[in-house]
Image (spheres, rainbow, N blue to C red):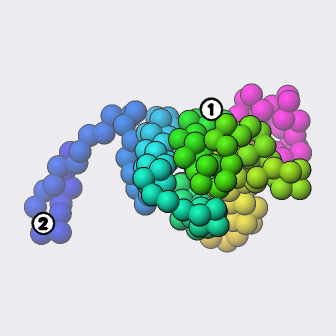
Amino acid sequence: VSLPGPSGDDIPLRRVPAGEGVTVVGVTQALNGAMKPQVTLLAEKSTEWAKKITDGYMNHRTAWNALNTMIWPSLTYPLAVCSLTKTQGDFIITPLYKALLPELGLQWKFPRLWCHAPTSLQGLALPHPYIEQGIDQLKMVLHRGLSTEINGGLQRASLAQAQLELGISTPLFLADFQQYGHLL
């Protein structure tokens, strides 16, 4: 299969296996929906940041600023369109926090539960990909779901389709998730 290029010559299209990740606009997706290519890419970024942290020196304040202004934004970009598991999130973030916690003035074996707990509960409020992914997805639905833009229309159509497939008259978000969640 080929398409005409800018000069009019036919350019062959590359055949991509369903499990292979294709990166478009900073997000790596496989045609079969597997998250492995995206997880691998994020884990590589995390490991790269960890190496940079261990090779250099930062004081505690610089380490916090680096996490919040450079490191985390570079990892969080694709999360809104991902469906990572908690285990995959742990895999992505472990090398980074192993290197970063000592730079923050903490022991690297600091309990992970308290690393991600909010400061109001005496935690460190460090971000976790799994949790941040859910927050980003909720924001996307809440902010764009009612908009007149194409994304809003697509989200409303998807919700209507899900409701139709379930065969219920109740609005989807009011339906009992315990009863219908496994069908979605």
Q: How crowded is mark 2: few (under 14 residues within 10 Å), some or many (20 or more)?
A: few
Mainly helix, strand or loop, the magenta region?
helix
- Residue at x 49%, y 54% (from the top left corner): 53
Q: In this view, does 88 lie to the left or right of 45?
A: right
User: Which residue is at the front of the view, 50 or 182?
Assistant: 50
Foreground disc of the pair 2, 1: 1
Q: What percent of the width, then of the height, locates residue 48? A: 43, 49
User: Secondary structure under badge 2?
Assistant: loop
Q: Give the range drawn in magenta.
A: 164-184
- Indicate yes or no whether the magenta region holds residue 180: yes
Q: Would you say residue 36 is visible in this rendering?
A: yes
- Residue at x 37%, y 46% (from the top left corner): 22
Q: What percent of the width, then of the height, locates residue 145? A: 72, 62
Q: In this view, does 85 lie above or below 28?
A: above
User: Which residue is at the front of the view, 25 or 114?
Assistant: 114
User: Which numbered disc covers residue 103?
Assistant: none
Q: In this view, does 163 lie to the left or right of 61?
A: right
From the image, tell me which residue sits under label 2. Answer: 8
Spatial CA span between label 2 and label 1:
48 Å
- Residue at x 54%, y 46% (from the top left corner): 99
Query: What type is the residue that disc 1 sits on?
Result: Thr
Q: Tell me the quarter of the image containing the N terminus.
A: top left
From the image, tell me which residue sits under label 1. Answer: 87
Q: What percent of the width, then of the height, locates residue 180? A: 81, 31
Query: What type is the residue that disc 2 sits on?
Result: Gly
